[in-house]
Image (cartoon, rainbow, N blue to C red):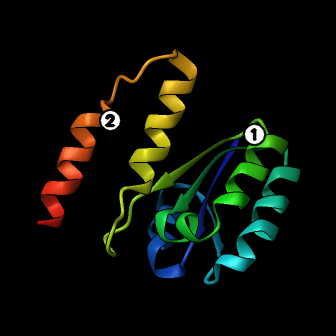
């Protein structure tokens, strides 16, 4: 049976348990590679959500996971000072798979600048 997992700080991922996700609590970014390695070894896991706050601190762990596992891994934004990492990751994936930038780099950079002013 296919499984989905949410990885991140407890207070940010606990709500996913209510909709059937497995919860993997990771409070420190240096623990993310080990957590993702365990999930990569589980062939039933097909979807993994990682909090943006962890993904920003350990991008190498996400790349390693993507090289080892066919599961979908995506970064989810949090309400805690988002730096739009999740949007940048999604834009990169769409651009890679389709060969064009559907989400608009220029529009995003203007939006990003507008929020900083």
Name the mark nearer the viewer: 2 or 1: 2
Residue displayed at 84% across by 44% down? 68
Disc number placed over residue 1 in the picture, else none = 1
Location of the N terminus (image quadrant): top right
Residue displayed at 51% across by 16% down? 98
- In percent of width and height, residue 47 lies at 63, 44
- In percent of width and height, residue 54 lies at 56, 70
Q: Is residue 17 above or below residue 94?
A: below
Q: How far, Cα to Cα, is label 2 from label 1?
A: 38 Å
Q: Disc 2 designates what residue?
A: 105
The answer to which of 103 and 3 lies nearer the viewer is 103
Helix, strand or loop at label 1? It is loop
The answer to which of 85 and 24 lies nearer the viewer is 85
| The furthest residue to the right | 41
Disc number placed over residue 22 in the picture, else none = none
Q: Is residue 84 above or below residue 73?
A: below
Q: Is residue 46 left or right of residue 112?
A: right
């Amino acid at each position: 049976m296919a499984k989905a997992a949410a990885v991140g700080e407890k207070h940010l991922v606990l709500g996913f348990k209510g909709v059937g996700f497995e919860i993997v609590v990771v409070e420190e970014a240096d623990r993310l590679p080990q957590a993702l390695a365990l999930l990569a070894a589980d062939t039933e896991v097909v979807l993994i959500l990682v909090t943006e706050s962890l993904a920003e601190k350990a991008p190498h762990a996400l790349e390693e996971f993507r090289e080892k596992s066919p599961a979908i891994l995506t970064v989810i934004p949090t309400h805690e000072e988002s730096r739009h990492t999740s949007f940048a990751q999604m834009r990169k994936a769409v651009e890679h798979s389709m060969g064009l930038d559907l989400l608009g780099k220029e529009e995003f950079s203007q939006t990003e600048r507008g929020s900083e002013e």
